[in-house]
Image (cartoon, helix red, strand yellow):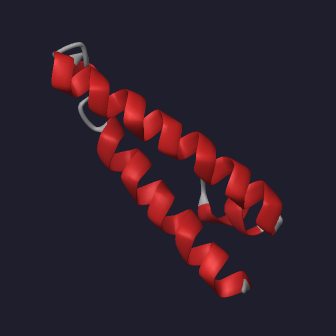
Amino acid sequence: MELKQLRQKSADELKAHLAELQKERFALRMQKATGQLPPSKTHEPRRVRREIARVNTLLGQIK
């Protein structure tokens, strides 16, 4: 999700999105550990980790 779209969300929506991202990150970590992560998706853990950082930054700015 782009930063412009994230900025339009409320704090509650950002927290919900953060929870989704953390679940996705966990699933990707488990896929990688068990060797089930397809070679075409090796960039996904990095993308999710960066988006988590973006959401946390925006939540810090709101408070």
Which image quadrant for residue 60?
bottom right
As drawn, is 8 to the left or to the right of 6?
Answer: right
56 in relation to 16, above or below: below
Which image quadrant for residue 32?
top left
Quadrant in which the C terminus appears: bottom right
Which image quadrant for residue 42?
top left
Q: What residue sits 65% from the left and 85% below the top?
A: 61
**Which x, y percent locates residue 55?**
58, 64
Q: How many marks?
A: 0
Q: What residue sits 28% from the left and 21% below the top?
A: 31
As drawn, is 52 to the left or to the right of 4?
Answer: left
Residue 9 in sight = no
**Which x, y percent locates residue 8?**
80, 65
32 in relation to 15, above or below: above
Q: What residue sits 24% from the left and 13% below the top?
A: 36
10 in relation to 60, above or below: above
Residue 22 in sight = yes
**Which x, y percent locates residue 48?**
42, 46
Q: What residue sits 46% from the left and 65% below the top?
A: 53
**Which x, y percent locates residue 5?**
72, 58
